């Protein structure tokens, strides 16, 4: 007995891959590759280093990194070659040739927990007004989105 097999669905391509194929051979392709440095940095260097050092600029093979303190700046200076190797391995190509470190403020690599959004209950008059405003949009899908945006905006107002 033959069983019918469903065809395997391929994973969707990432936006980076799609843009890479569209921009292949253009100067923008290199900018896209360079932008991946920010995507791979935290994982490539590890969370401990990433919490004290973050990339801020890339130009002609030199990656500029802000480091949050003098002791970390000194420590990372000793690790410069290793950091370059790790970032290039994460990129699967040798883009970073030099690492320039500067003392500066660094954004936190750890995301802060978000506070729940406080919303208030809309009055009957506000709900009617929102519907009236949305009626100006002809497309039903767009009208629903517009209505939802107005509603959320009003719910956040005190």
Image (tube, rainbow, N blue to C red):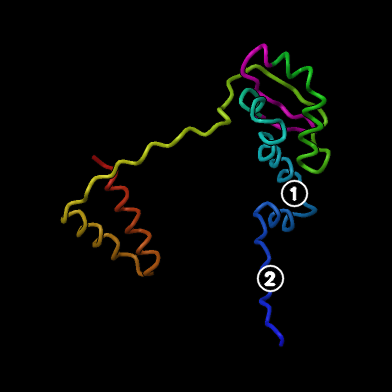
Question: Does 96 sit above or below residue 73?
Answer: below
CB of mark 1 within 8 Å of CB of mark 2?
no
Q: Residues within 10 Å of mark 2 (few under 14, many from 20)?
A: few
Side of 123 relative to 106 (left or right): left
Question: Does 26 sit above or below residue 51?
Answer: below
Residue 58 colored in magenta in the image = yes
Q: Position of residue 152 (x, y in %)?
A: 32, 50
Residue at image point 66% right, 11% down: 70
Looking at this view, is 126 or 84 the one in front?
Answer: 84
Residue at image point 76% right, 35% down: 87
Q: Give the label on residue 29, or none.
A: 1
Q: Start and end of the magenta stretch? A: 55-72
Residue 41 colored in magenta in the image = no
Q: Earlier in the sequence, mark 1 or mark 2?
A: 2
* SS assignment for the magenta stretch, majority: strand
Count the labels in the image.
2
Residue 68, picture quadrant: top right
Front label number (1 vs 2):
2
Residue 62, picture quadrant: top right
Q: Which quadrant of the figure contains the N terminus? A: bottom right
Q: Secondary structure at mark 2?
A: loop
The residue wearing badge 2 is 8
């Amino acid at each position: 007995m033959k069983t019918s097999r469903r065809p395997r669905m391929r994973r969707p391509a990432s936006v980076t891959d799609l843009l890479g194929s569209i921009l292949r051979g253009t100067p923008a392709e290199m900018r896209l590759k360079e932008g991946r440095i920010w995507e791979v940095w935290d994982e490539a260097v590890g969370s401990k280093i990433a919490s004290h050092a973050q990339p801020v600029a890339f130009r002609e093979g030199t990656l500029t990194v802000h480091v949050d303190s003098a002791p970390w700046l000194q420590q990372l200076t000793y690790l410069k070659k290793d950091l370059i190797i790790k970032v290039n391995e994460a990129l699967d190509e040798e883009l970073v040739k030099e690492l320039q470190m500067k003392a500066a403020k660094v954004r936190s690599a750890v995301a802060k927990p978000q506070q729940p959004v406080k919303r208030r209950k809309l009055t009957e008059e506000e709900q009617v007004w929102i519907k009236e405003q949305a009626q100006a949009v002809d497309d039903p899908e767009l009208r629903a989105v517009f209505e939802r945006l107005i509603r959320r905006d009003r719910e956040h107002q005190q």
